């Protein structure tokens, strides 16, 4: 029987007080979630993982199988998967593991090393089980080389664009069509920078007769943060799951995903941090990741107009790729995905408008905005430090009170 307690002890109130259920795993915190498989109530990701191996393993299996079937198996993805499996097998051999303990069979290893295609369905039942365990434990993620953000590289400070916002070196029509069919990062390995627009950016006056909102700078901060978060989450490879990447952008950016209108930089950053620390993304890094992403925003602003235009152009490609995959029928659930498609179209137009606006701003505008972002980060850190100190003081007082009661 579920253990339920009231959220208040005021018996004099005539209002029917809501009942809250204690976590069925730790029995310490109020439950916030319900397992969709066994209906067990739990309070956190840790409790979910430990409440039932049968539930968590089947959930992981279904999600991994679904994701593997949806991923585009282009040459780049195949090479990356092959490299990971080779490193995984090499480490096993170096550790002198017994043949029976090998994660992959000799037949599977030979197929991979020969360059053949390998899908999840090709694995044996035991190999699938071990593969899922390796994913759940984080063992496979350790073999993925950490991505170095393009805006932290020296080449990011040497970006040069024409007056129209296009690359100084224009490509022929065939090369442009080739780039449009390949991933943005892969096509620009030589420059390490996402490609700028291939066509001249129009003047804002051509796009709208109304005067641009003074809040566009604030909205830009929100958009930059969501872009950095998404690329860090996908280790720089948003092309591997364009729809998933687009959904992350919409969920983190209140401007693009919820038609939000933050009026201050602090409000924009606070909203982004709230999403970063939400149950959906807390496991990625929480507040510490959020603060590092604010540093990313400041770095990009310090790079000025050229880097910002390349960023927004890459983000527009991300959104458009998500739209294309959605139309092609991937993950189709009409009732839900029609709304997502509408949001992606609005986001596409908004990003393009802000890209044109960015290109018309004076260079000193970015140093001013950079300083505001840094200042607001400091205020956020001070607030979090104060909140932590208050919480610790409250716990100390509570402990002292309990001790006094026990003495009495």
Image (spheres, rainbow, N blue to C red):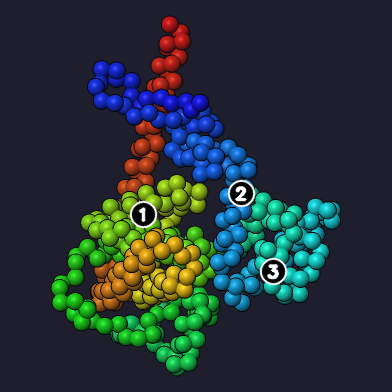
Provide the residue designation for mark 2: 58
In which quadrant of the rendered image does the C terminus lie?
top left
Residue count near mark 3 (Cα–Cα under 10 Å), binned few <14, some 14–19, many ≥20: some
Quarter residue 214 falls in: bottom left
Query: Which circle's residue, 2 or 3, is located before the other in the chain?
Result: 2
Position of 99 compared to 174: left or right? right
Question: Residue 130, relative to residue 227: is it above or below?
Answer: above
Question: Residue 255, relative to residue 30: is it above or below?
Answer: below
Position of 102 compared to 118: left or right? right
Q: CA distance from mark 2 to mark 3?
A: 22 Å
Q: CA distance from mark 2 to mark 1?
A: 32 Å
Is there CB contact under 8 Å for labels 2 and 3?
Answer: no
Residue 290, image x, y percentages = 42, 53
Position of 322 compared to 119: left or right? left
Provide the residue designation for mark 3: 118
Residue 113, image x, y percentages = 75, 71
Residue 127, image x, y percentages = 73, 57
Name the residue at the front extreme: 334
Position of 362 compared to 67: left or right? left
Q: Nearer the viewer, residue 33 or 328?
A: 328
Q: Residue, x 52% and y 36% (percent of image)?
A: 40
Provide the residue designation for mark 1: 272
Q: Secondary structure at mark 3?
A: loop
Give the mark count. 3
Residue 336 in sight from this viewpoint: yes
Q: CA distance from mark 3 to mark 1?
A: 38 Å
Q: Residue, x 53% and y 63% (percent of image)?
A: 235
Q: Secondary structure at mark 2?
A: helix
Quarter residue 340 falls in: bottom left
Q: Nearer the viewer, residue 269 or 68?
A: 68
Q: Residue, x 57% and y 60% (percent of image)?
A: 66
């Amino acid at each position: 029987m579920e253990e339920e307690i009231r959220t208040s002890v005021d018996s004099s109130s005539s209002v029917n007080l809501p009942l809250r259920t204690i976590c069925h795993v730790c029995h310490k915190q109020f439950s916030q979630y319900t397992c969709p498989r066994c209906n067990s109530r739990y309070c956190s990701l840790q409790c979910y993982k430990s409440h039932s191996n049968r539930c968590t393993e089947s959930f992981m299996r279904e999600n991994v199988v679904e994701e593997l079937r949806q991923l585009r198996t282009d040459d780049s993805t195949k090479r990356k998967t092959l490299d990971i499996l080779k490193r995984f097998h090499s480490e096993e051999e170096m550790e002198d593991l017994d043949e029976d303990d090998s994660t992959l069979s000799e037949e599977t290893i030979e197929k991979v090393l020969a360059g053949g295609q390998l899908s999840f369905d090709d694995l044996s039942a035991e190999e699938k089980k071990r593969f899922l365990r390796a994913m759940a434990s984080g063992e496979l993620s350790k073999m993925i080389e950490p991505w170095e953000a393009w805006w932290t590289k020296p080449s990011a400070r040497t970006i040069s664009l024409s007056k129209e916002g296009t690359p100084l070196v224009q490509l022929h029509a065939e090369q442009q069509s080739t780039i449009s069919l390949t991933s943005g990062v892969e096509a620009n390995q030589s420059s390490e920078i996402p490609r700028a627009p291939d066509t001249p950016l129009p003047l804002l006056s051509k796009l709208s007769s109304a005067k641009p909102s003074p809040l566009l700078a604030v909205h830009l901060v929100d958009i930059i943060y969501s872009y950095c978060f998404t690329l860090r989450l996908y280790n720089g490879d948003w092309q591997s799951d364009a729809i998933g990447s687009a959904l992350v952008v919409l969920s983190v950016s209140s401007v693009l995903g919820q038609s939000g209108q933050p009026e201050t930089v602090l409000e924009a950053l606070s909203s982004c941090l709230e999403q970063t620390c939400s149950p959906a993304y807390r496991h990625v890094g929480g507040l510490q990741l959020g603060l590092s992403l604010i540093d990313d925003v400041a770095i990009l602003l310090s790079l000025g107009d050229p880097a910002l235009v390349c960023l927004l152009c890459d983000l527009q490609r991300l959104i458009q790729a998500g739209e294309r995959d959605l139309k092609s029928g991937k993950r189709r659930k009409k009732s839900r995905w029609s709304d997502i498609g509408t949001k992606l179209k609005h986001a596409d137009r908004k990003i393009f408008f802000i890209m044109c606006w960015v290109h018309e701003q004076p260079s000193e505008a970015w140093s001013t905005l950079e300083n505001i972002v840094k200042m607001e980060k400091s205020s956020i850190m001070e607030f979090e430090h104060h909140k932590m100190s208050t919480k610790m003081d409250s716990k100390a007082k509570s402990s002292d009170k309990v001790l006094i009661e026990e003495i009495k």
